[in-house]
Image: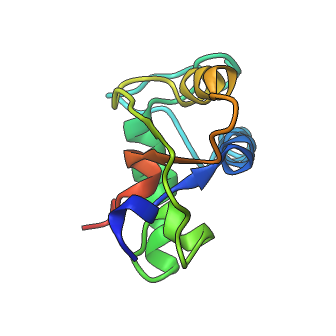
């Protein structure tokens, strides 16, 4: 699948946020020395680095070492939106900002933490 098809939908981001929140509540995503986030904070959340290490890599590894986007959409989705993030940015804050600024008419977003294979 060509890289311009390694995308997620707006709904995928909504579901990803819910999944992260569930994993934090269950203690499956935990604060670290690098990321001493407050598990009770629903506004900023754990940083992208923590989410990648504690959620994205283990899940996509079990799915055959693919990216999150291709795990969800094996044939890919044509990219019409590119979003970038900081690795120390809180995941809830990032997702909320992306959802609130999602352009009308855009369907599929390329986001490196979800689009690129992280378990290399």
Residue 89, position as x, y percentages in the image: 42, 23
> At 42% across and 74% down in the image, what residue appears?
66
Considering only vertical position in the picture, is 65 above or below 91? below
- Direction bottom: furthest residue: 64
Residue at screen point 39% across, 51% down: 53
Q: Tell me how many marks there are.
A: 0
| Residue 75 spot, x, y in % from top left | 54, 78
Q: Residue at x 52, y 79 (%)?
A: 63
**Which one is nearer the viewer's eye here, 78 or 27?**
78
Foreground pick, 3 / 118:
3
Q: Position of residue 91 (x, y in %)?
A: 54, 30
Quadrant (top left, top right, bottom left, bottom right) of the C terminus: bottom left
Name the colour scheme. rainbow
Which residue lies most toward the front here?
Answer: 105
- Relative to residue 19, is residue 66 drawn left or right? left
Residue 20 spot, x, y in % from top left: 65, 43
- Give the camera-side residue of 61 and 3: 3
Please identify the quadrant where the N terminus is shown.
bottom left
| 10 lies above or below 62 | above
What residue is shown at x 50% (from left), y 24% (from top)?
90
């Amino acid at each position: 699948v060509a890289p311009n098809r390694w995308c997620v939908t707006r709904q995928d981001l909504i579901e990803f946020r819910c999944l992260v929140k569930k994993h934090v509540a269950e203690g499956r995503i935990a604060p670290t020395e690098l990321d001493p986030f407050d598990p009770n904070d629903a506004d900023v959340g754990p940083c992208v680095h923590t989410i990648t290490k504690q959620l994205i890599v283990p899940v996509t590894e079990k799915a055959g070492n693919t990216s999150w986007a291709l795990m969800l959409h094996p044939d890919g989705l044509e990219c019409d939106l590119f979003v970038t993030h900081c690795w120390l940015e809180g995941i809830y804050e990032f997702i909320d900002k992306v959802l609130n600024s999602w352009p009308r008419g855009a369907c599929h977003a390329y986001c490196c933490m979800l689009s690129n294979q992280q378990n290399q």
